[in-house]
């Protein structure tokens, strides 16, 4: 794996490199570790510093180094870089109106952030921010309920539906080295009570799961909804099923993409959306760990 610092090849200095992404993590990040002992070993005097630009070969990652880590008793240095989604933390100021894609383009353009391919489900949305919302919050608001992944392609913001693109297929014990499965009702909400303007119950919708009893949520009708039930359904939560697989390293397996797992006699088989990914290269070994959201599960 080639590692570049400010355009210069830094690969020979690297002891280990890891990178990761997560649906709950705004920016992807990379951590590099390398030998650094300027006082005792003249050969180990190169170091990256905060503000340097870090690139992984093959277009895997572009970002800015924000952290340095070193202990006094160690001869190694570590740096962590975040991709350019880090800048989406900046606050937004304005009234943004239009289709979801056009709003994303508006809020990014006024902050000097380029956009690449943007998913646009159509319709018109409006988001107002007087500095209380970040750029990323504005983007999340325009895609509310759309299951859209926000990511960077180089320096450009892109959006797409989760699981639209298939990153690949993993099969057999030689490719899938470990797997785990989780099913939870911990966050279950199985009834939404509809409230009128006087906060009086006027209806309800459910999603079943009566064996767990009843967990209520309230939806206050605003009068602006096109479909009240559809809006209230967003409050309902069923069983949350997820899993993890450890596979032979593949940089194409990243959060937002889909992967097909075909492992004989495993509880995890089918097509899944990747909701987290971590990659590590150390001692010529490369492994990838994927967090999966289940579209299908074979028990």
Image: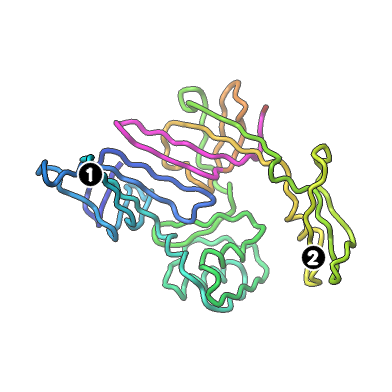
The CA span between labels 1 and 2 is 58 Å
Residue 188 lies in what quarter of the image?
top right
Q: Residues within 10 Å of mark 1 (few under 14, many from 20)?
A: few
Q: From the viewer's perspective, tell me whether residue 294 is left or right of residue 36.
A: right
Residue 193 magenta: no
Q: In front: 133, or 265?
A: 133
Residue 184 lies in what quarter of the image?
top right
Residue drawn at point x = 71 percent, y = 40 percent: 185
Q: Residues within 10 Å of mark 2 (few under 14, many from 20)?
A: some
Residue drawn at point x = 42 percent, y = 72 percent: 112
Q: Report which residue position mark 1 lands on.
A: 72
Q: Report which residue position mark 2 lands on.
A: 220
Q: Is residue 82 above or below residue 130?
A: above
Q: From the viewer's perspective, tell me whether residue 228 is left or right of residue 94.
A: right
Q: Which residue is farthest right?
A: 202
x and y percent of residue 96 in the render?
Answer: 58, 75
x and y percent of residue 38 in the render?
Answer: 13, 46
Location of the N terminus (image quadrant): top left
The answer to whether the residues at label 1 and label 2 have Cβ atoms under 8 Å apart is no
Residue 276 magenta: yes
Q: In front: 164, or 210?
A: 210
Q: From the viewer's perspective, tell me whether residue 264 is left or right of residue 200.
A: left
Q: Which residue is farthest front?
A: 72
Q: Nearer the viewer, mark 1 or mark 2?
A: 1
Residue drawn at point x = 78 percent, y = 68 percent: 225
Q: Is residue 171 above or below residue 96?
A: above
Q: In front: 107, or 243?
A: 243
x and y percent of residue 155 in the render?
Answer: 39, 61
Q: Which residues are magenta?
A: 274-298
């Amino acid at each position: 794996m080639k590692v570049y610092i400010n355009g210069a090849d830094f690969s020979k200095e690297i002891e280990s490199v890891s990178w990761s992404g997560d649906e709950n993590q705004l920016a992807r990040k990379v951590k590099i570790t390398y030998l650094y002992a300027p006082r005792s070993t003249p050969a180990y005097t190169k170091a990256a510093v905060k503000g340097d630009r870090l690139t992984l070969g093959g277009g895997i990652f572009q970002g800015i180094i924000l952290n340095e880590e070193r202990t006094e008793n160690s001869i190694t240095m570590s740096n962590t870089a975040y991709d350019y989604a880090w800048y989406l933390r900046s606050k937004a100021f304005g009234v943004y109106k239009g289709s979801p894609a056009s709003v994303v383009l508006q809020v990014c353009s006024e902050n000097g952030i380029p956009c690449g391919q943007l998913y646009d489900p159509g319709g018109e949305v409006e988001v107002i921010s007087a500095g209380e919302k970040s750029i990323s919050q504005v983007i999340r608001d325009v895609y509310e309920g759309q299951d859209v992944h926000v990511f960077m392609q180089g320096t450009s913001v892109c959006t797409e539906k989760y699981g639209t693109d298939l990153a690949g297929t993993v099969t057999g014990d030689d490719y899938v080295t470990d797997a785990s499965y989780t099913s939870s009702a911990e966050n279950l909400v199985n009834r939404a009570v509809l409230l009128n303007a006087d906060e009086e119950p006027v209806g309800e919708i459910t999603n079943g799961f009566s064996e767990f009893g009843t967990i209520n949520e309230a939806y206050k009708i605003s009068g602006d909804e096109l479909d009240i039930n559809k809006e209230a359904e967003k409050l309902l939560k069923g069983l949350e099923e997820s899993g993890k697989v450890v596979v032979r390293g593949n940089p194409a397996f990243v959060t937002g993409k889909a992967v097909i797992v075909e492992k004989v006699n495993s509880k995890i088989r089918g097509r899944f959306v990747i909701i987290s990914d971590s990659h590590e290269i150390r001692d010529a070994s490369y492994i990838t760990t994927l967090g999966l959201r289940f579209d299908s599960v074979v028990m």
